[in-house]
Image (cartoon, grey):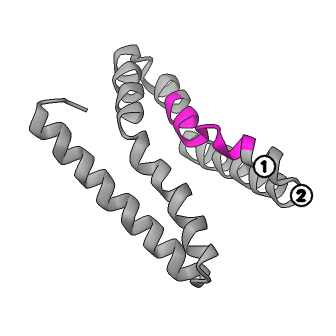
Amino acid sequence: MFNATKIIISALIIFIASEIAKRDTLVGAIIVSLPLISLLSIIWIYIETRDIERIISFSYSIFSMILPSLSFFLTLPYFLKKNISFGISLTLSVAIMVVLYFGLAALYKKIGYVV
């Protein structure tokens, strides 16, 4: 039952955020730029485990991987401005982000940084 509650609350928050974004892009962008998935995950982990050390580690890991995710928000509008179709632009942007995730993970491993 708890898993169903998590799914419903998470889906409802995403639904509300996307509906607001359709009406007002600035307010929508502010809401969506909040780390909603991270916040929800941290809340669910805390409720389920009460493990503060796990939350600390998880928070640092999220912070360590933010840069590759930002590339998506630079490449998607770039490709769209070049009149590349939405589907291809989205695919290319996600692919670039994934490559950067793996590249950053490899760099962290090489320098001995544990995520």
Is there a contact, CB below 8 Å, between mark 2 and mark 1? yes
Image quadrant in which the C terminus is located? top left
Q: CA distance from mark 2 to mark 1?
A: 8 Å
Looking at numbered disc 2 in the image, what kind of residue is underneath it? Arg
Q: Is residue 73 magenta?
A: no
Earlier in the chain: of badge 2 and badge 1, it is: 2
Q: Quadrant of the N terminus?
A: top right
Residue 93's label in the rendered image is none
**Is 34 left or right of 67, judged from the image as shown?**
right
Q: Can you say whether 96 is above or below 69 in the image?
A: below
**Residue depicted at x 49% and y 23%:** 46
Of residue 104 and residue 15, the one placed in the foreground of this image is: 104
Query: In which quadrant of the rendered view does residue 60 lie?
Result: top left
Label 2 sits on residue: 23
Q: In x, y percent, where is residue 27?
A: 82, 44
Q: Secondary structure at mark 2?
A: helix
State the extent of the magenta-drawn residues as a range. Answer: 30-42
Left or right, 21 with reference to 87 = right
Residue 37 percent location from the top left of the image: 55, 42
100 in relation to 90, above or below: above
Residue 21 relative to residue 95: left or right: right
Q: Which structural element holds mark 1? A: helix
Q: Amino acid at mark 1?
A: Gly
For the point 51% across and 63% down, which residue is it? Answer: 75
Q: Position of residue 76 (x, y in %)?
A: 55, 66
Q: Nearer the viewer, residue 41 or 102?
A: 102
Q: Main secondary structure of the magenta part?
A: helix
Residue occupied by mark 1: 28
